[in-house]
Amino acid sequence: MILAQEKDSLTLLKNNRTNYKKIAPYIIPTTLLVYGASSLYVDGVRNIDYQFQKKISASQPNFSSNIDSYTQYLPAATIVGLELLGVKGKNHNKDKIFIFALSFAMYNGIVRIQKNVHARLRPDESEFNSFPSGHTTTAFATAELLNQEYKNTQPWVGYLGYVVASGTGIMRMYNNKHWFSDVVMGAGVGIVSTKLAYLIYPSVKRIFTCKSKKESNFSLVPNYQNGNYGLSLNGRF
């Protein structure tokens, strides 16, 4: 009886650890999403935005830099650079491209919808599309891509990607373009989008490959229209 109870306890403990490992990667990004969303409805959280921006404006009233327009793409550029140097990631290049395309489709759609629905005024009062920060979303989405590809072989690369992404978000606040909660929400959206992309990609890949013997040719092409960047997936089944 006692041995059976101990065995059941060990099995329960093992299952709990397994379940925790499955949800652990989503705890931080979910927290970021909850905090960012709460700024839309909770006055106390929104007041933190005003306090942050007040302190930044007081310490750096004339600050202006466009470096954040470039650092948002630095994690993605790092992946390309590592591949050119022969440092291979977890997936082949074609797989990485499709995973990024999935992530991009998700976070770009979320950001566009949120900006239109909430129409939050930017700190510099230039536009009503502050929430969430698109620059920060892109930076954290590609930083998570970098982390996923190299965390088992070069973990420092993923950490560096997150440092750069965080710096991008901070720069958006110092440039008076985004509130703190805009940046936090952008980080959460970016990380979750890439994590979900890795989660669903195996199923998506099976649809386009092994299940059919028909010839399939696909191309992923960047496009630019009316001031917006995007990706076009063209294929023949």
Image: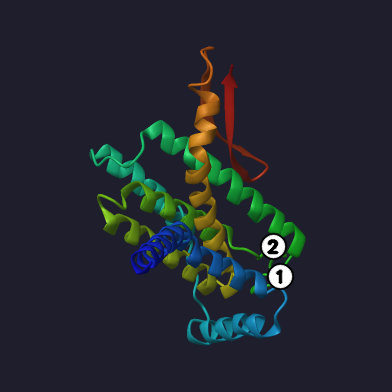
- For mark 2, give the secondary structure: loop
The location of residue 124, given as percent across then percent down, is 64, 73
Q: Is residue 189 visible?
A: yes
Q: Which residue is drawn at 50% across and 57% down?
A: 191
Query: Relative to 184, is 137 above or below?
Result: above
Q: Is residue 67 shown left or right of residue 181?
A: left
Q: Mark 2 points at which residue?
A: 129
Q: Position of residue 46 (x, y in %)?
A: 66, 80
**Relative depth, front residue between 188 and 24:** 24
Rendering quarter of residue 126: bottom right
Q: Is residue 130 positioned above or below 55 on the image?
A: above
Give whichever of 219, 15 is nearer the camera: 15
The residue under label 1 is which amino acid type? Leu
**Disc 1, SS:** loop
Using the image, determine if residue 89 lies above or below residue 13. Answer: above
Quarter placement of the N terminus = bottom left
- The label shown at residue 121 is 1
Residue 5 at x, y percent in the picture: 40, 67
Measure the alpha-carbon separation of dots 1 and 2: 6 Å
